[in-house]
Amino acid sequence: MSGIQRRLMDVEPQLNHLEARALFFALADEELPEPQAKAVRTHLDGCDECRAGWDRYARTVQRVRKVEREKAPPVMASLVMTRVKRERRFGLRKLHLAHTYHRFPVEILIPLLLAAAVAAFLVMSAP
């Protein structure tokens, strides 16, 4: 490794505004690895705009964490979990079942269209 490469590795990465703000969530939850957390804090020390944004974000996170958690009624929790399990089970395969969620099922539409086509053919072919 050359001397220039070693010096580049010693330099802390510079974050721009978008990169720093994108890491706010992980920084608030203390999930960032130390080098990234240090880079964000360094950016916040030198950037008034991002520091103000971080202060607002951190205050909001603290307020949300203070809110008492409510427990969902058992019936609602059961309905939600049933729907989640169904979503996991069918995923994108359920798109072919989309017609079952509408009032007029496709199973009825196909015979009706076929009957209309036969009736039109008979009317047109009648003397």
Image (spheres, rainbow, N blue to C red):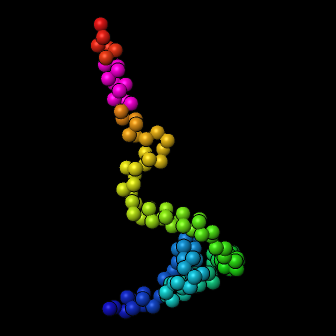
Q: Which contiguous range is marked in magenta?
A: 112-121
Q: As rendered, which of 26 and 112 lies closer to the eye?
A: 112
Q: Where does the image place residue 44, in percent across and percent down from the top left?
A: 62, 81
* Residue 114 included in the magenta stretch of the image: yes
- In what quadrant of the picture does the C terminus appear? top left
Q: Nearer the viewer, residue 39 or 105?
A: 105
Q: Position of residue 111 (x, y in %)?
A: 36, 33
Residue 18 sits above or below residue 99 on the image: below
Quadrant of the drawing holding the N terminus? bottom left
* Residue depicted at x 39% and y 60%: 90
Q: Is residue 102 magenta?
A: no
Write the residue at 30% across / 11% down: 126
- To which quarter of the image does residue 46 belong? bottom right
- Which quadrant of the figure has residue 51? bottom right
Does residue 54 show up? yes
Taking depth in this image into account, of 11 and 44 the one nearest to the observer is: 44
Q: Nearer the viewer, residue 52 or 78?
A: 78
Name the main secondary structure of what is drawn in magenta: helix
Whether 61 is drawn above or below 92: the answer is below
